[in-house]
Image: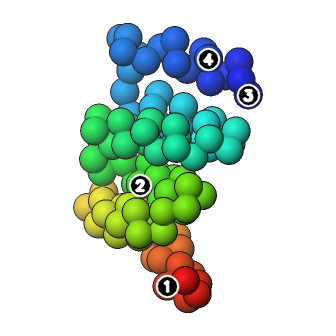
Amino acid sequence: MRNLIDNLRQQCDGPRDGALLRFSLGSALLGEKNATAAIAELERALEFDPVYSAAWKLLGKACLEAGQPDAATHAWRRGIAAANRRGDKQAEKEMTVFLRRLDKTPP
C-alpha cells in the first residue's frame, strides 16, 4: 500500500491531479489508518469536484475514524445534498443510513 500512496503522491500537482487522484490517495491513506491525512486529500478532491458523492461518503468515514463525529455528520449531510444533485440515489441512501447509525451512537 505504501508504494501506491507514494505513486499517487508523485502525481499530485501535475497534469493528472484532480478529484479522482485525490480520492484514490485519500482512500489509500484511510486504508493505512491515516485518517487525518485522508481527510486532507478527500477535502482536496472535493475542491476539484464539490458534487463527488463518493468523496463525501469517504470523508465522513475518515472523520469518524479520526474521532470527529460532528465533522462526519457535516460531511454526510453535504454528501447527501451532492448525491441528490447528481442523481446518485445509492450514495444518498448509504449516507442517510450512516447518519442514522451515528445519531443512535451514545456520546
Q: Which dot marks residue 6?
A: 4
Q: Which residue is mark 2?
A: 56
Q: At x 38% / y 37%, what residue is drawn?
A: 45
User: Which of disc 2 and disc 1 is earlier in sequence?
Assistant: 2
Q: For numbered disc 3, what is the local secondary structure?
A: loop
Q: CA distance from mark 1 to mark 2?
A: 18 Å
Q: Which dot marks residue 95?
A: none
**At which x and y percent is residue 67?**
55, 62
User: Which of disc 4 and disc 3 is earlier in sequence?
Assistant: 3
Q: How many marks?
A: 4
Residue contact between numbered discs 2 and 4, judged by CB atoms under 8 Å: no
Within 10 angstroms of label 2, few (less than 14), some, or many (20 or more) residues? many
Q: At x 41% / y 54%, what residue is drawn?
A: 56
Within 10 angstroms of label 1, few (less than 14), some, or many (20 or more) residues? few
User: Which of disc 3 and disc 1 is earlier in sequence?
Assistant: 3
Q: CA distance from mark 3 to mark 4?
A: 9 Å
Q: Which residue is mark 3?
A: 1
**At which x and y percent is residue 50?**
27, 47
Task: Name the mark nearer the viewer: 1 or 2.
Answer: 1
Residue contact between numbered discs 1 and 2, judged by CB atoms under 8 Å: no
Q: For numbered disc 1, what is the local secondary structure?
A: helix
